[in-house]
Image: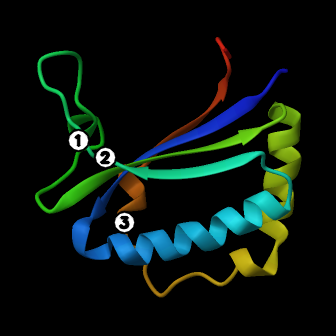
Amino acid sequence: MARYVDGFLLAVPKRKLAAYKAIAAKAGKVWRQHGALEFVESVIDDVPNGFGVPFPKAAKTRPGELVVFSFIVYKSRAHRDAVNKKVMADPRMQEAPAAMPFDHTRMSWGGFKILVDL
């Protein structure tokens, strides 16, 4: 089965993690209702050293911040585009919080073709 993934890497202040979780849970419901197959938000728990670039460095975390890694799974890139169009038109997504609980200018994201799916 061909699928497509949008992936996100961002730094969230520990003191704002609950606010981020609330926003993400709301957004996840909207994405799923419009057809996303999966919507996952995860917070870093283990940071091995000595190999490659650790996620905190890649996310350019500052003191007091945690790494959040997120992904949304779709049937295909065309399906992703159709779902995202519906999501962006959904009135629930227009209700922006007073302030985002993270610095969106440091967020990394992209769409990915699945290379191996076992």
Taking 9 as reference, is 96 above or below it?
below
Total tally of numbered discs in the picture: 3
- CA gap, disc 2 to disc 3? 15 Å
> Do labels 2 and 3 touch, CB within 8 Å?
no
Taking 74 as reference, is 32 above or below it?
below
Specify whether 4 is left or right of 41: right
Specify whether 5 is left or right of 55: right
Which colour scheme appears in the figure?
A: rainbow
In-front residue for pair 37/27: 37
In-front residue for pair 110/5: 5
What label does residue 102 carry, if any? 3
Image quadrant for the N terminus?
Answer: top right
Q: Position of residue 8 (x, y in %)?
A: 50, 44
2 or 3: tag closer to the N-terminus: 2
Q: State the SS at label 2.
A: loop
> Which residue type does callout 2 highlight?
Ile
Q: Nearer the viewer, mark 2 or mark 3?
A: 2
What label does residue 56 carry, if any? 1
Callout 2 crowding tier (Cα within 10 Å): few <14, some 14–19, many ≥20: few
Q: Position of residue 57 (x, y in %)?
A: 21, 37
> Which residue type does callout 1 highlight?
Pro
Taking 49 as reference, is 8 above or below it?
below
Q: Position of residue 28 (x, y in %)?
A: 66, 63
